[in-house]
């Protein structure tokens, strides 16, 4: 799930930003994996602090109107379930339940690496593999402002545009849009469901308070 690695922000912000991805592997366990993915989805949905979920197969996220039963119906032809959390304990609880379910489907959790390893250790799991972001290199002066990057990088496929983020930020600062409405609007283009609207709302709130 390398597209979730490059989320831009401070360590404090990222302590409240976790993504998960359950993924079947072609030629290994993808054939007939629908029931197992539905089981994983039901476990994720049982966590009341699940912020968002979705998939490119379904074509949209929860924040864009995807219903749980619609999502479940796509999983016979899909190969993964994705979503995000803002709460450490929800991630811990999710992993405990997935460990007990033992579906045989790989589970990827993204967040601050030290925190992920710590959570795994607390529940008797040993991470199989770790991917780390080495940051952005090149002409970084061409990148948009930090606050915009904090928002746009929550969609790892780049579907949330910098111009849209800037317009929403300006409307929130002007009092023409609430941070909650702004976060929900920004989540619309990201079908994977890993756009964390809780975190986005906080970014927009902090920005509005600076004016």
Image (cartoon, rainbow, N blue to C red):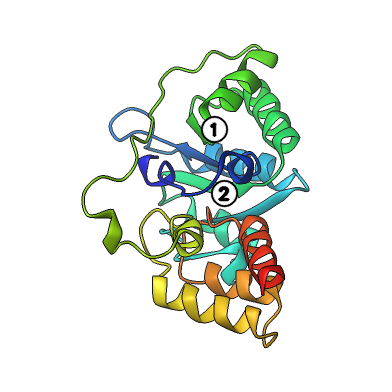
Q: Residue at point 40% right, 53% down?
A: 156
Rendered location of residue 9, percent (x, y): 52, 48
Tell me, for residue 112, which label it has, or none: 1
Q: Earlier in the sequence, mark 1 or mark 2?
A: 2
Q: Position of residue 139 (x, y in %)?
A: 22, 54
Position of 70 compared to 86: left or right? left
Q: Residue furthest bottom?
A: 176
Report the disc number at residue 83. Answer: 2
Q: Residue at x 28, y 31 (%)?
A: 27
The span from disc 1 to disc 2 (Cα, nearest Å) is: 16 Å
Element under label 2?
A: strand
Q: Find residue 129 and report its image quarter.
A: top left
Image-quadrant location for residue 128: top left
**Residue 177: which quarter of the image?**
bottom right
Residue toward you, 80 or 28: 80
Q: In the rendered view, does 179 fall on the left or right side of 165?
A: right
Q: Secondary structure at mark 1?
A: loop
Asked if residue 123 shows in the view, the reply is no
Of circles 1 and 2, the one toward us is 1
Seen in the picture, residue 14 relative to 71 is either above or below; the reply is above
- Could you tell me if the residues under marks 1 and 2 are in contact, i.e. CB atoms within 8 Å? no
Q: Is 69 on the left-hand or right-hand side of 164?
A: right
Q: How many marks?
A: 2
Residue appearing at x 68%, y 72% in the figure: 208
Where 37 falls versus 118 (above or below)? Answer: below
Check the image and report above or below for 4 versus 53.
above
Quadrant for the C terminus, please: bottom right
């Amino acid at each position: 799930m390398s597209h979730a690695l490059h989320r831009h922000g401070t360590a404090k912000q990222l302590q409240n930003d976790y993504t998960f991805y359950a993924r079947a592997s072609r030629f290994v366990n993808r054939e007939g994996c629908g029931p197992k993915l539905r089981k994983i989805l039901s476990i994720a949905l049982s966590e009341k602090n699940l912020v968002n979920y979705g998939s490119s197969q379904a074509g949209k996220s929860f924040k864009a109107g995807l219903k749980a039963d619609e999502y479940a119906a796509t999983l016979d032809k899909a190969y993964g379930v994705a979503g995000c959390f803002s709460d450490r304990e929800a991630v811990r609880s999710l992993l405990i339940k997935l460990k007990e379910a033992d579906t045989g489907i790989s589970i990827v959790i993204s967040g601050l690496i030290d925190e992920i390893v710590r959570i795994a250790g607390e529940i008797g799991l040993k991470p199989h593999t770790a991917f780390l972001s080495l940051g952005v290199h090149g002409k970084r002066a061409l990148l948009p402002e930090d606050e915009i990057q904090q928002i746009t990088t929550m969609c790892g496929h780049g579907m949330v545009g910098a111009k849209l983020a800037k317009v929403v930020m300006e409307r929130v600062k002007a009092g023409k849009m609430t941070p909650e409405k702004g976060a929900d609007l920004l989540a619309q283009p990201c079908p994977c469901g890993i756009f964390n609207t809780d975190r986005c709302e906080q970014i927009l709130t902090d920005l509005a308070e600076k004016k």
